[in-house]
Image: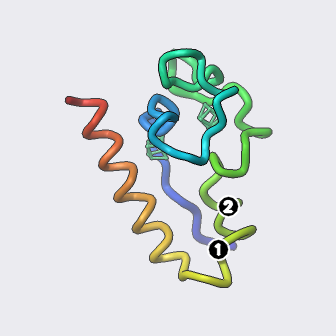
Amino acid sequence: MDEKFSCDCCGACCKNIRRSTFYTEELDRGDGVCKHLTAENLCEIYSERPIYCNVDAYYEKFLSQKISRKRYYEMNYQACERLKKLNSD
Ligand code: SF4
Ligand code: SF4
């Protein structure tokens, strides 16, 4: 696989886990922010993060036979933009 999802590590998804049905309650530190997110917006369990936190692995496992990678990335980038906007409001 050559192409990779481009994440700028803004942390917006990890700070809004209650907005997605993917994330489990046990990740929530109590305010909708993932308990594994560091102050530098890094994931402290990155190599073992849940598959729904791993855009590329999720695609390979669940969606590669259903939608194109291009379309999937577009949807993800749009979601990222919405989340970033929330965080800047
Ligand atoms: S919102 Fe998007 S760009 Fe920001 S950390 Fe999450 S996946 Fe990466
Ligand atoms: S496990 Fe890591 S990647 Fe997933 S929401 Fe938490 S900090 Fe973000």
Query: How is the protein colored in the picture?
Result: rainbow
Q: Quadrant of the C terminus?
A: top left
Report the amino acid beneath label 2.
Answer: Tyr
Position above or below: 68 against 88: below
Can you give x and y, in whole percent of width and height, for residue 88 in the image? 24, 30
Name the element at disc 2: helix
Where is residue 55? Give x, y as percent.
60, 56
Of the pair 84 and 19, the residue shown nearer to us: 19
Where residue 28 appears, as percent x and y from the top left, is: 60, 24
Q: Please name the residue shown 69% across and 25% down the image.
A: 44
Q: Quadrant of residue 35?
A: top right
Amino acid marked by disc 1: Leu
Seen from this angle, which residue lies furthest right? 48
Residue 23 sits above or below residue 76 on the image: above
Q: Residue at x 48, y 17 (%)?
A: 31
| Ligand 2 shown in quarter | top right
The residues tagged by marks 2 and 1 sit, at their Cα atoms, a distance apart of 7 Å
Q: Are marks 2 and 1 in contact (CB under 8 Å)?
A: yes
Quarter of the figure that contains the N terminus: bottom right
| Mark 2 C-beta closer than 8 Å to ligand 1 | no
Q: Nearer the viewer, residue 54 or 1?
A: 54
At 51% from the left and 24% from the top, the residue drawn is: 33
Mark 2 nearby-residue class (10 Å; few <14, some 14–19, many ≥20): some
**Residue tagged 2:** 58
Q: Which residue matches tag 1?
A: 63
SS label for mark 1: helix
Q: Earlier in the sequence, mark 2 or mark 1?
A: 2
Position of residue 3 measured from the top left corner of the image (x, y, whole percent): 58, 70
